[in-house]
Image (cartoon, helix red, strand yellow):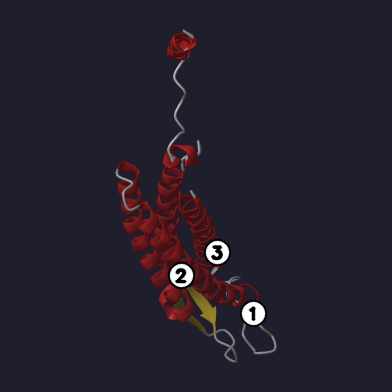
Amino acid sequence: MAATDKTAVDSELPPKSEAAPPDAAAKCPFNYSLVDVALRVLVFAATLTSVVVMVTSKQTELVSVPGFPGFRLTLQAKFSQSPALVYLVAALSVTGLYSIITTLASVSLVLKPVYSKSFLLVFASLDVVFVGIVASATGAAGAVGYIGLKGNKHAGWTKICDIYDKFCQHTASSLALSLFAAILLVLLSMMSTFTLYKKIRH
């Protein structure tokens, strides 16, 4: 009789909730995949705009020739005259292409997250590489821009931004966008590493 009562009581109790699967328990309300896509789109926009601004930075002015008073030449300033600025344009162009490819890959992960761990590992590694590329190019171009702005009396390099003001403004804007792209790549690298760590841990 006691066994029958116990069975009846057990049948009236609500069923115990099953433990959530590891994937559901590891889920975070913050959607890293969508943020990753948005940041990569921003990287592409920043690099493309920076390249366009730099490539269109041309200015022609009449420049006085030292030692010949009253004698002036028509000279043009453009990015192709500086290897550092050419390196910046090349680095940003490659980074822009990389951001397009990784954006498409991130969108595929949002739609079908089957190989997410493998993709995240590749993203984290390549993002670090491109951080180095963009940062080095920005630093090299920034050094040239600083000499153009301030000059160097010890080396005998005169400043040119007082003559080619529009060219220098374009260069400064391009450098700012390049720096912004480098910061975005740092954030992407950190986020990819953190997301991969969470997936491996759970």
Query: Label 3 sits on what residue type?
Result: Ala
Q: Nearer the viewer, mark 1 or mark 3?
A: 3
Count neighbours of disc 3 (C-alpha within 10 A) and say few if under 14, some if 14 to 19, many if 20 or more.
Answer: some
The vertical placement of 107 against 132, above or below, is above
Mark 1, residues whose alpha carbon is within 10 Å: few (<14), some, or many (≥20)?
some
Q: Earlier in the sequence, mark 1 or mark 3?
A: 1
The numbered mark at residue 129 is: 2
Residue 99: x percent and y percent?
38, 58
In the image, what residue type sits under mark 1? Gly
Residue under the image location 44 percent in, 49 percent down: 36
* Amino acid of disc 2: Val
On the image, numbered disc 3 is attached to which residue? 172
The part of the image, by quadrant, that contains residue 162 is bottom right
Residue 147 visible in the picture:
yes
In percent of width and height, residue 96 lies at 38, 61
Instruction: Classify mark 1: helix, strand or loop.
Output: loop
Q: Farthest residue toward the front?
A: 1
Q: Residue 109 in the image: x percent, y percent?
A: 33, 48
Choose the circle earlier in sequence order: 2 or 1. 2
Q: Position of residue 164 (x, y in %)?
A: 53, 70
Q: Nearer the viewer, residue 78 or 116?
A: 116
Camera sees residue 78: no
Q: Are marks 2 and 3 in contact (CB under 8 Å)?
A: no
The residue lying at 64 percent from left, 79 percent from top is 151
According to the picture, the residue beneath numbered tag 1 turns out to be 151
Q: Residue at x 46, y 40 (%)?
A: 31
User: Nearer the observer, disc 2 or disc 3?
Assistant: 2
